Amino acid sequence: MGFTCPNRLPALPALLFLGLFMFTVYVYSPSNQSNGSPAQQCPQPADAQPKFNLMEETYGNEWDKQSADKYLSPSYCTIEYANTFKLQQDHPCVIQLIRENYIGQPAPKNVPYQMDHPETIDPSDGQSKEILKILKNLTNGFFIECGGFDGEFLSNTLYMERSLDWTGLLVEADKKAYGQLTSRNRKAYTSPACLSTKPYPMEVVYNGTVGAYGAIIEEKIPQSHSLKGESNQIAPAKDTEHIYKMQCFPLYSLLLAIGRTQVDYFGLDVEGSEYKILETIPWHKVNIKTITAEWNHVPGGEAGLTRLMESNKYTKTGLISNYYTREVVYVRNSFLVYQ
């Protein structure tokens, strides 16, 4: 006598139901989600940038074990290509371009300074005093100063260099000021560029009309990634004496070009672009102990700047408010531990 089930489904619908059930279990199982679910496999938009636009984010942690030619033929390594294709901060081509065209070497120590007011011991507006108090009058330190202006007027770092044997990197985009800077015989690297507000090299329009208060007024970022160099942009007007196109690089790119990622003091005064510049820095790749940054032209003000720096493990330790200066002081948390 055969066994019967009064609620049994017809064979074909039952099989379809079973197949659908098994497919659902497979797609939404934890093991499958961790190995490339449909959501994880969606490609990023073509213009999406990694957080810091680093080589390792694109090619993996061992990218530097390959020849630089693997990533770009030398014949393509031009500043136009680097800007158009937004090459990585640490791309070998970008570092090569900086070393060959955008870095001036320190003057020999035996060459005398050429200052307009050599009797002024410390021309800074309070920055060097504040930083040296934190660093306990450190000798043989390393600084970055941007903008470096003419290398003397309101220089945050001249006292450190002349009196405490520091060296460093002076970045100045103003053409006239940079010419004066290079005549001072500073014992530091110099760069006639601006710091990029994006994590890649870029060309901008720079306004140097007001001298020490020069600033980026327009970012000229190529929109097309065509190998033919096509762009949707309208060609900028011709350069004038005070308003002209200027090449910018990320700070990290400049540091790699001079072979220095350990920095004792970073002075940043660029009339409003401070927040964007600090956002480009891969903080896990550098060790910058102390920072002063102008805040009064930043859209988010001092509070916004401080939130950014706190998120990158820095502590606000003070404000400098003098005639020429509205700056905030930050110290890296890991350095404060040892104070």
Image: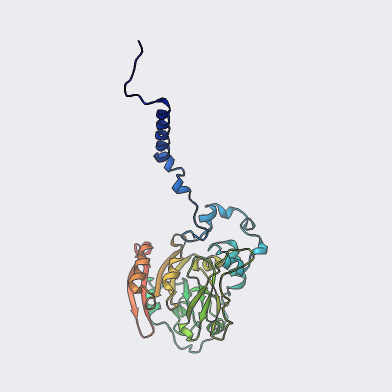
Residue 172 in percent (x, y) is at 51, 78
Which residue is at the front of the view, 10 or 173? 10
Taking 104 as reference, is 21 above or below it?
A: above
Of the pair 336 and 47, the residue shown nearer to us: 47
How many discs appear?
Answer: 0
Q: Is residue 65 left or right of residue 5?
A: right
Q: Of all residues shown, which one is farthest toward the top?
A: 1
| 278, above or below 271, in the image | above
Indicate the position of residue 81 as horizontal and vertical percent values.
Answer: 61, 66
Between 316 and 58, the one lying in front of the other is 58
Query: Does residue 295 appear to the left or right of 45 in the view shown?
Result: left
Can you see residue 328? yes
> Is residue 71 positioned above or below 1 on the image?
below
Q: Quadrant of residue 192?
A: bottom right
Residue 189 visible in image: no
Give the residue drawn at x 51%, y 76%. 170
Q: Quadrant of the C terminus?
A: bottom left
Image quadrant holding the N terminus, namely top left
Residue 330, given in percent of the width and then of the height, sits at 37, 70
Q: How is the image coloured?
A: rainbow
- Residue at 54% x, 62% y is 88
Res. 276 image quadrant: bottom left
- Image spot of residue 257 (x, y percent): 56, 67
